[in-house]
Amino acid sequence: MLVRRGLLVMLASSVFFAAMAVAIRFLKGDADSPHINAYMIALVRFAAGNLFVLGAFAGRRARRRWVNWRWIVVRGVMGGVATISYYWSILHLGLAKGVLYGYTYPIFAAVLAVLILGERLSVKHWLAVGVSVAGMGFVTGIARFSIFAGDMIGLSVGVTSAVAIVALTKCRRTDTAINIFWSQCLFGLLFAIGPAIYYWVTPTWSEAGLLLLVAVLSIAGQLSMTSAYRYTGATYGSVLGLLSLLLATGVAVLVFEEQLSLGFWIGAVLILVPCIYLGIRPVARKRTAGARPG
């Protein structure tokens, strides 16, 4: 029953995140409109998140209490950096490519779960990781010896997100979802506020509406994902989130008419198939003692 609950909540989270990515892509605009940068989007998103959390604390719907300070700080810092880089990738690399890079994190999370969470990968698991790495090579252009700096920024989202996901899994043993979410909003706001003010452009009414929509969808997706990770592992939960990738890629092709290269499609398949395998055959997790509802 608890696993089914985690599955349903994670699927809902995937839909929220896919819709958020689409809203960000609409903010790219064209040459005749002001360019809404990633820092501005992150500023609104994290400010809204902080207001939501502080409102919950003020209304006594949640208690402000961090137990596992070390991992909550890691979660906040890495999650904040990953979010800003993810927004940048969607704006500058396109919806499909930006989201694909962001969703390479199940592979990195699987490796980190071995080192940090004590999970165990079989030979087939490691083979899946290796195939996915080859897929990343096709998407970034390494296989064609034509890699760009932007691709590295996009790929870094997968790495930082993986660290944040593993830290989230550690925190869920002792801390509530809203406190973990608050850490990301708090550190993310600190990272975004300076560059956002420096590169500020006044948004139009439609852009302001999209900024608020991004914030709402992000809060809904983040809270539901954080809650779901209590019932799913670092690897299994990550794979469930791949629905966002499929939905966003479909919108990129059908709505924004993004032209995706053969290398992208080959790489996407090489990444997606191993991620699905890691979901069907999740790695073994150590039993957690002392977990409590949150």
Image (cartoon, rainbow, N blue to C red):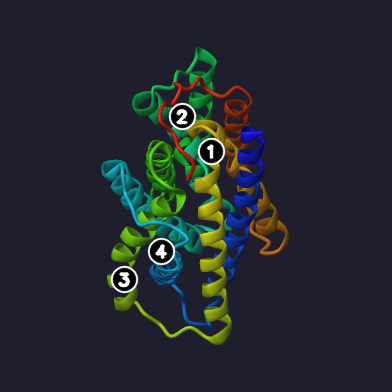
**Comes first in the chain, label 4 or label 1:** 4
**Is residue 65 shown above or below 55?**
above
Left or right of 145 on screen, residue 246: right
- In the image, 72 versus 242, the foreground residue is 72
Instruction: Please tell me which of labels 1 and 2 falls first in the chain.
Output: 2
Hey, which residue is sitting farthest top in the picture? 123
Amino acid type for the residue under numbered disc 4: Phe
- Residue that numbered label 4 is attached to: 57
The crowd level at tag 2 (other Cα within 10 Å; few <14, some 14-19, many 20+) is many
Foreground: disc 4 or disc 1: 4
For disc 2, the marked residue is: 110
* Mark 3 or mark 2: whose residue is earlier in sequence: 2
Specify the farthest residue to the front: 60
The residue under the point 40% across, 24% down is 114
Q: Is residue 163 left or right of residue 136?
A: left
| View extreme (right): residue | 254
Residue 136 drawn above or below residue 156: above
Three-letter code, disc 3: Ile
Amino acid type, label 2 = Ala
The quadrant in which residue 206 appears is bottom right
For the residues labelled 4 and 1, the Cα–Cα distance comes to 29 Å
In 3D space, how far apart are the residues under numbered discs 2 and 4 (Cα atoms)?
A: 34 Å
- Helix, strand or loop for disc 1: helix
Q: Are marks 1 and 2 in contact (CB under 8 Å)?
A: yes
Which type of secondary structure does the marked residue at label 2 adopt?
helix
Q: Tell whether label 4 touches label 2 (CB within 8 Å).
A: no
Coordinates of residue 211 in the picture (x, y in percent): 52, 73
Give the CA separation, mark 4 to mark 3: 23 Å
What residue is pinned by disc 3?
Answer: 193
Residue at which label 1 appears: 238
